[in-house]
């Protein structure tokens, strides 16, 4: 009972002071195989869209899926930071991502309905979306430095002020002690994941509306990309630092999609061309990361200290 208390804002357990060093889980073949299964299901669904709605809708779904899949890779960087900041045990990361993805599907459905209604009523909103995507892409390109501490997220901070919590992760999201229910650190972790996904949704959903105005295509492409996100995390988490040019590719994708929306009144970019450009940018950023890896900083040269045997050997009478 002694460790049950209302935590202060920003406290995240015994390792809460500052961001701990990242220790991503090892790359798991099972995660890669599961992501392959989700990709196969998405392509199978795309084939169904082709037979039911025609080739144009099928290309729209495929382009939207590729955009969302590429942007979802950036989520993995954020998941790594969140799990490190809150010292989430590896066995609980699966559960946190499950509830995070489930909540994201609900929130994105709301965003898509609102976005479709806005575009239907106000056609000029498409130019607003396009300008926002260009701004986001340029901002991402110029971004420098480390990631923000997720514990400073206002949604998370409000949660910590209102909900009685405890330090120990325990066995689930909440525990009951002496007739009172307390939140374990897993619950604010899920809240942090949901809050950051809202930020990602603000970028990714307008990007897919640049391809199609059909809410069904927009939502289903989001769903299939998000369903494979948990498997993709455990497949790539251990080697995300190798893809240092990925943010460049993602920023170019966002900028290009935004430009497509801004130029819609002058020139309608064909969907096959959009798909080819997006795929090339994403694949090119991955290939560039592997061809030109970051150089690890060299360890400082060790110098002999006064009085050491090596220096004593050099002293002459």
Image (tube, helix red, strand yellow):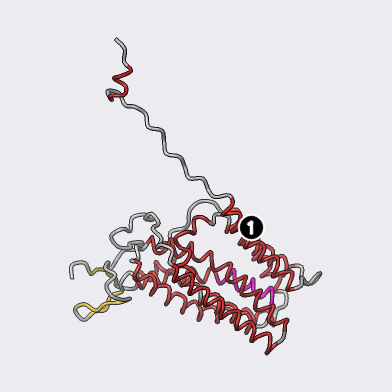
**Residue 168 at x, y percent in the picture:** 26, 68
Question: Relative to residue 82, is residue 244 depicted above or below?
Answer: above
Question: SS class of the residue under badge 1?
Answer: helix
180 relative to 259 in the view: left or right: left
Q: Quadrant of the N terminus?
A: bottom left
54 relative to 317 in the view: left or right: right
**Residue 269 at x, y percent in the picture:** 76, 70
Residue 256 occupies which quadrant of the picture?
bottom right
Residue range corresponding to the magenta coloring: 201-213
Look at 57% across and 58% down and name the residue there.
246
Look at 38% across and 54% down and name the residue there.
21
**Residue 124 at x, y percent in the picture:** 72, 74
Residue 271 occupies which quadrant of the picture?
bottom right
**Residue 44 at x, y percent in the picture:** 60, 82
Name of the residue lying farthest toward the bottom: 52
Q: Quadrant of the C terminus?
A: top left
Question: Relative to residue 13, is residue 96 depicted above or below?
Answer: below
Does the magenta run of residues contain 266?
no
Name of the residue lying farthest toward the top: 317
For residue 169, say whether it is visible: yes
Residue of label 1: 138
């Amino acid at each position: 009972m002694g460790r049950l208390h209302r935590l202060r804002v920003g406290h995240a357990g015994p390792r809460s002071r500052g961001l701990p060093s990242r220790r991503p889980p090892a790359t798991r073949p099972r995660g890669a195989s599961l992501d392959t299964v989700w990709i196969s299901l998405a392509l199978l669904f795309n084939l169904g869209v082709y037979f039911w709605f025609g080739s144009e809708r099928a290309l729209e779904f495929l382009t939207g899926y590729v955009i969302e899949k590429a942007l979802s890779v950036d989520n993995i960087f954020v998941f790594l930071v969140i799990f490190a900041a809150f010292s989430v045990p590896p066995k609980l990361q699966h559960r946190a991502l499950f509830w995070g993805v489930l909540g994201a599907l609900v929130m994105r459905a709301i965003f898509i309905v609102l976005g479709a209604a806005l575009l239907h009523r106000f056609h000029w909103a498409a130019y607003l979306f396009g300008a926002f995507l260009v701004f986001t892409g340029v901002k991402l390109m110029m971004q420098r430095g480390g990631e923000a501490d997720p514990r400073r997220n206002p949604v998370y901070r409000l949660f910590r002020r209102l909900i009685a919590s405890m330090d120990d992760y325990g066995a689930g999201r909440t525990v009951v002690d002496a007739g009172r229910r307390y939140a374990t650190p897993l619950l604010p972790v899920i809240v942090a994941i949901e809050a950051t996904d809202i930020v990602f949704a603000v970028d990714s959903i307008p990007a897919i509306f640049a391809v199609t105005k059909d809410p069904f295509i927009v939502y289903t492409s989001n769903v299939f990309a998000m369903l494979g996100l948990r498997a993709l995390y455990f497949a790539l988490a251990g080697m995300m630092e190798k893809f240092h040019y990925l943010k460049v590719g993602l920023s170019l994708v966002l900028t290009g999609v935004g430009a497509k929306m801004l130029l819609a009144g002058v020139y309608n970019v064909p969907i096959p061309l959009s798909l080819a450009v997006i795929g090339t940018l994403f694949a090119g950023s991955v290939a560039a990361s592997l061809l030109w890896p970051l150089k690890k900083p060299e360890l400082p040269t060790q110098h002999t200290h006064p009085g050491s045997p090596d220096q004593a050997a050099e002293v002459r009478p």
